[in-house]
Amino acid sequence: MQHRHEQRLCYLTDIPDQGVLALDSVWALAGADVLLARTDDHVSAFHNTCPHAGRRLDWAPGEFLLRGRVLTCAAHGACFEVDTGACLGGPCRGEGLQAIAVDVRDGAVWLVEAIGGDHCTG
């Protein structure tokens, strides 16, 4: 049986509805930078790293190029569907953002990490 460890990342209201929030150096993910995208009460979480060149997606700390549900990497223009992380165009076509498992409950966003397993699942 696999055990689970959870860490509260933020409150749901910290993420703008239809927007994105950056979290820097999440200790439970070995200091990885994370982005959280919210639609109503649903949150998708990804490593804040473009698969094309390994750079952060924000053009300035916490500032993202988001039009509708498409997130554009500030470095080279790769476009991602913000709810799934799928690359829609640009230099990383066929790749996607690395998803992180989260749960939304009691007004908060929780990182769900399976101890002894892969914590970055879609």
Image (cartoon, rainbow, N blue to C red):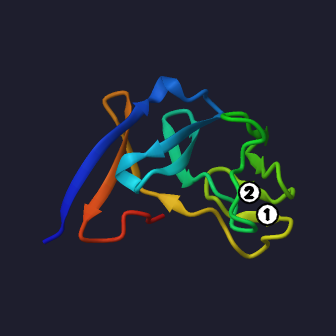
Q: Amino acid at mark 1?
A: Leu
**Nearest the eye: 85 or 47:** 47
The mark found on residue 103 in the picture is none
Q: Amino acid at mark 2?
A: Phe
Task: Specify the quadrant that holds the N terminus.
Answer: bottom left
Residue 38 appears left or right of 107: right
| Residue that protrudes farthest toward the left in the picture | 1
Residue 14 appears left or right of 4: right
Name the residue tied to disc 2.
80
Q: Say whether marks 1 and 2 touch (CB < 8 Å).
A: yes
Q: Please, is residue 22 above or below residue 90 in the view? A: above
- Res 116 → quadrant: bottom left
Residue 103 appears left or right of 20: left
**Nearest the eye: 24 or 14:** 24
Residue 85 at x, y percent in the picture: 64, 59
Task: Tell me which residue sits at (84%, 69%) in the image.
Answer: 91
Q: CA distance from mark 1 to mark 2?
A: 5 Å
Q: Mark 1: which secondary structure?
A: strand
Q: Mark 2: which secondary structure?
A: strand
Task: Tell me which residue sits at (52%, 39%) in the image.
Answer: 23
Residue 56 appears left or right of 15: right
| Residue that protrudes farthest toward the top in the picture | 13
Residue 36 at x, y percent in the picture: 55, 42
Name the residue tied to disc 1.
88
Task: Tell me which residue sits at (78%, 52%) in the image.
Answer: 73
- Res 107 → quadrant: top left
Of the two numbered discs 1 and 2 on the same chain, state the one appearing first in sequence: 2
